[in-house]
Every structure is written in C-alpha cells, then in structure tokens.
Image (cartoon, helix red, strand yellow):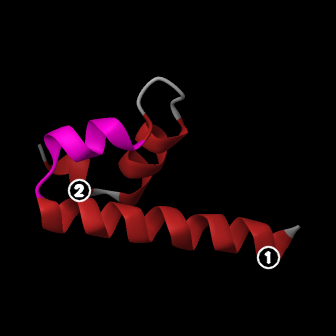
Amino acid sequence: MESQKTRIYALAIILNPTLKFDWIDQHCAEDDEMVAQTWICTSMLEYQMLQ
C-alpha cells in the first residue's frame, strides 16, 4: 500500500498510543522503517523549535 510510504501515515501510527513504533517494526521493510524514524525525529524537532 503506497499510503504507508507517506510522512503523515508514519506520524499517525507513531502518535497512536496502542501502536507506536511496534507496528512499523512489524510491517515495514527496514529501509522504510528508517525513513519513518527520520520523519518522526524531524517532525518532533520542528515542533519543538516552534514552542
């Protein structure tokens, strides 16, 4: 599914308290997992800088 390779999809999964990174670890290729983790870190840093 191509929607799984979008930044917003990764953010939604991580923000869900029942899923977090577990879902990504179990359902994504290692390369896609690394991209998702980078997106999450970047988004968190961007949010922190706005505060």
Quarter of the view holding residue 1: top left
Image depth: mark 2 or mark 1 in front = 1
Residue 5 drawn in magenta: no
Residue drawn at point x = 68 percent, y = 73 percent:
46
| Direction from residue 41 to residue 6 in the image, left or right | left
Numbered disc 2: secondary structure:
helix
The residue carrying mark 1 is: 49
Numbered disc 1: secondary structure:
helix
Instruction: Please say if 21 is above or below 31.
Output: above
Percent from the top left, x then y, of residue 50? 83, 71
Count residues near mark 2 (Cα–Cα under 10 Å), then give few for <14, some for 14-19, many for 20+.
some
Which kind of residue does numbered mark 1 sit on? Answer: Met
Percent from the top left, x then y, of residue 51? 88, 67
Dominant secondary structure (helix, strand or loop) of the stretch shown in magenta: helix
Instruction: Please say if 48 is above or below 25.
Output: below
Which kind of residue does numbered mark 2 sit on? Answer: Lys
Residue 25, numbered label: none
Dot 2 or dot 1: first in sequence order is: 2
Residue drawn at point x = 27 percent, y = 45 percent:
24
Residue 25 drawn in magenta: yes
Instruction: Work out whether residue 19 or residue 9 is closer to the camera in this orientation and state it.
Output: 19
| Direction from residue 36 to residue 8 in the image, left or right | right
Instruction: Please say if 45 is above or below 37.
Output: below
Residue drawn at point x = 14 percent, y = 62 percent:
30
Residue drawn at point x = 23 percent, y = 56 percent:
5
The residue carrying mark 2 is: 5
Count residues near mark 1 (Cα–Cα under 10 Å), then give few for <14, some for 14-19, many for 20+.
few
Please state the extent of the stretch shown in magenta in the rendering: 21-29
Percent from the top left, x then y, of residue 9? 37, 46
Percent from the top left, x then y, of residue 26? 18, 39
